[in-house]
Image: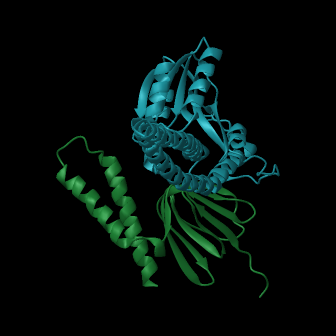
Amino acid sequence: MAMQTKTIKHKMQSVQNIGKITKAMEMISVSKMKKSIEKRGASHIFAQRSFELLENLHIHKQLTHPYLESRKGTKVLMLIIASNKGLCGGYNMNVSKQVTRFVQDNPKLVVDAIVVGKQSEKIAKRNQLQVVASFTEFSDYFTAGEVRSLLHAITERYSQDESYKEVVIAYTNFVSSLSFEAQVTPMIPLQVDKAQKLLGMEGVSDKRKFAQYTFEPNEQEVLDSVVPSVLMTVLYQFLLESLASEHSARVMAMRNASDNAGELLEDLRLNYNRARQAAITQEIAEIVGGSSAMS
Amino acid sequence: MSEKKQLHVIITTPLRTVYDSQVDQITVTTSEGEITVLPDHIPLVVPLKVGQAMVKKEGREIYHAIDGGILEVRHNNQVVILSDRSENASDIDVARAEAALKRAQILIEEKHHEEDVDYARVERDIAKELNRVKIAEKGQRK
């Protein structure tokens, strides 16, 4: 009997320790979540202005650029954004499900993957996609330079290989700190109104007549620098959406884990007390039995 | 004096909005050379080089370092600068900019015979840091 109380005590100790760890992880994720949400908000203005600029250019004249036109092809380049670390509930699994769904919905297309995060490598493998580039060193504080190298990897492949029909992104859209949804969305060819809608920026630009713009040195050169900058913005925003979702998912997962640890601890404590009581009762019974045998 | 027309200048980067205010004029380094934008300028879109954006407001000159980007002048006296990175002269950490500059220069010197250094990139970095130091000094002078 003494043995049983000891093992229960032991279990309680380990559950308590795990609870402490998950609690700490929850706290860390809360602060990271706050930061990433802040960041997401900070770049909103920039993104909005970039979209407006591109839209203004569109209104005044139908301009053409390789990244704005749709192409025919048999291949799709898919950018998968997931986390580097696990322990974030269904976050990665939801992205994976969307990827699977996309592959099943488009059986005729060959899907090549560019992955961001160690977990998305696994997602690509699970869906039997060929990984053409892997970015697993992105930290929580990725820089503009890192995003640019990612964009470069994407655009280079896309512009060199004519058989790519489009570039799509599998990412997690951040709705609020309690809800986020994984989705697959087109990136190139760039559709301004769609991208705006996805990032919750629609309805800002009014459709008034814009005066004719002057371009220096010329229209094509301006467009050549505007379009990549908008793509960059879109990509940056998508990465931030995913990051904010990841941390929120982790907060939720860790909170659940902490709650479960608490419940488990309560159950164990009850069991422990019962076992202790049983041991005492038995000991008394033995003493009483012993003394009555002596007298 | 009657109500003077002013420009609404916004300098924004992916990380934050650096500057947002009504000003009298703005001078920027474009790919075609330095231009000054005054109120009632025609709508204009032009790429920016690594350089400065100087705004004049109530007789004061305020400097910003710009790591390239795009300038958009809208018809309603709005000026938007979209830049990858920009700082107000007073926010620039001169010591850090100088350290970064030195690092890049050393990289160029040391690896002179090695092929794996991306010269174009390092040189661009040098230009950016030089620009930053220059503008920080300008900001301090006044």
Q: In the figure, residue A182 lies in which quadrant?
A: top right
Q: Position of residue A206 (x, y in %)?
A: 80, 51
Is residue A290 toward the left or the right of residue A182 in the image? left
Q: Colour of chain A?
A: cyan
Q: Position of residue A294 (x, y in %)?
A: 40, 38
Q: Position of residue A85 (x, y in %)?
A: 45, 38
One can see residue A85 in this view? no
Q: Colour of chain B?
A: green
Count of numbered labels shown in the rendering: 0
Q: Residue furthest front?
A: A295
**Nearer the observer, A10 or A76:** A10
**Nearer the observer, B120 or A134:** A134
Q: Position of residue A171 (x, y in %)?
A: 58, 35
**Nearer the observer, B90 or A11:** A11
Q: Residue furthest right?
A: A208
Q: Quadrant of the C terminus of chain A?
A: top left
